[in-house]
Amino acid sequence: MSVQAKGGFKLPTGRLSRKVVFWVFTSVVAIEAILLIPSVWRREREFISQIEEVSAGKVAVIKQVIQPQMYDEKFLEEVKKLQDLEPINLSGKLQHKIIGGALYKSDGSLVGTFGEKPELSFDDVNSKSAIDFRNKKGDRYEAVWIPQMMPNSFTLIVRHDTSSVQPELNAFILRIAGLVLIISVVVTAGTWIALDPIAITPILRLRNDLIGAGEAISKDEEPPEFYSANVKRKDELGDVISAFNQMFRKITEAISDRKQAEAALQESLKKVEEYSQKLDEELDKGREMQTNFLPVHVIEKPVQVMQKPGWEMAAFFKPARQVAGDFYDTFELDDYVGLVIADVCDKGVGAALFMGLFRSLIRIFSQQIRLKGNASGILEANSPADGWIGESELINVAHVNALQAVKVTNNYIAENHGELGMFATLFFGVLDPATGLLTYINGGHEDLLIVNPDGGVKQQLKSTGPAVGMLPDLKFKVQQTRLEPGETLLGYTDGVPEARAAGGEFFTTKGLLSMLEQPVENVTTLLEQISKAVLEHTGAADQFDDITLLAVRRNPIKIKN
């Protein structure tokens, strides 16, 4: 943008022009100001030197008329004549005027003073701390003539009136400042006039090219004829224009490549969607098959899993993904019931496959394996730490035989699939419904809880061995307990205490135990309460792990009236 001056040329008025002109003017003024400071100081010293030279001439005249045998007082009388001399105009308003002085002998004694007494003393001169002096106001200056310069070894201090120095100095500053202003205006005006053809107009045209290029790109149109395409400059602005042309060419090439890539991507996305749809269908089939492995083919809500007179059994199962690594199982073992809850390491398809393998092996081996030897020998070799609770050797042996499935499953997994590093924490218990006797192995799983009829945890069924499938020939100890009428056995996987809210807070085992303080009405209600509390805790957060619950309750004995 520019305005037409009277002479016919244009002055640019854009923001960039004003900034450039402002900084050119400011820079010139600043440079001249920096140069002015030492110039003023030198000029001031020149004025003082002129005054001192005139005084030196006058003192020289007096020195010629003084005789060596002249008395001190007579010498002082001659020196006093310096004050009586008329002021001398040196240059402009600068004057030479002596207004006082002092005369000292060589030993430092004062001969006398005349006019204004000098502020310098003989001691100041003798200690060489000062050979001249100017007061703070600058209107007084004192010069010294030491004994080597005076007859009879006198020391003379002459006081001058220098009040005329500052006005003359001010006049010098004004002259220099005017010259600086003229130079600054001329340089700034020349810069201002030259800006338009050299920089401003090319920049504005380049801006228009940029706008046109942006519109052409946004509307996917052919680019217009650019001003910058025909400009050949060998300066920085020419480099910018060249960079613009290269940039636009690369952008158009990139857009063309992008269109081709988008078309290829669309085709790839179509194939991915088809594959993803097929994969989802396969995973849905896997989910359906995995659900069929469960005693009751229902997930994500508590459900009764087995009907036994005098007993309630329910489970809750909610996978974190389409397929899961958690599982539970309840199955008939002749006159007994097998109870399993397990958590295969990892998640997803791999864990789901091993879940099916673990379930099948436990079911098959628990019904096929029979230990060799007499009953007492078998029971002695597998005796719990606290001894056998069950009174019947036959029942105890039957339970031990079934629990050998854990050891055989461990060896099978470790020997045949050890390189995959897959294992499971697993609780396998054999329940005698007639007596409530429970014989179990806890292979590294979460502690199962026995809950009192009136609430509160009576016993924790802690781990009796390592996780299943880690290494061959691991040892798994057998333990026994008994469920009394009204008591409930509760098993769960780590997806319950480790359920995580959106803020990262865990549900925790403590949170689970707090829900077991109240009396248990029935196991289905209990699992509804626990699962609801866990899911409310996680809220909108993604489910991190599978959630599995298994509850078995021995019904209370009804007292007949």
Image: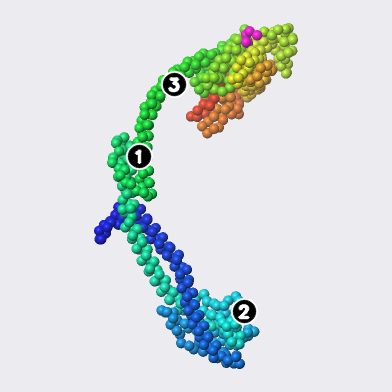
Which of the two discs, 3 and 2, labels the residue nearer the N terminus?
2
> In the image, is 223 to the left or to the right of 332?
left
Q: Is residue 368 magenta?
A: yes
What residue is pinned by disc 1? 248
Real-space CA distance between mark 3 and mark 1, rounded to the nearest whole angstrom: 39 Å
In the image, residue 203 lies in the stretch drawn in magenta: no
- Give the residues in magenta: 365-369
Q: SS of the residue at dot 2?
A: helix
Magenta highlight: main SS: helix
Dot 1 surroundings within 10 Å: few (below 14), some, or many (20 or more)?
some
Q: Nearer the viewer, mark 3 or mark 2?
A: 2
Q: Quadrant of residue 424?
A: top right
Q: Which mark is residue 263?
A: none
Q: Which mark is residue 276?
A: 3
Query: Residue 433's spot in the image, x, y percent?
Result: 63, 11
Q: Is residue 533 visible?
A: no
Q: Is 386 above or below relative to 335?
A: below
Which of the numbered marks, if any, corresponds to residue 126? 2
Mark pair 1, 2: CA separation: 83 Å
Q: Residues within 10 Å of mark 2 (few under 14, many from 20)?
A: some
The one nearer the camera, 151 or 220, is: 151
- Under circle 1, the secondary element is helix
Residue 229 place in picture, x, y as percent: 31, 43
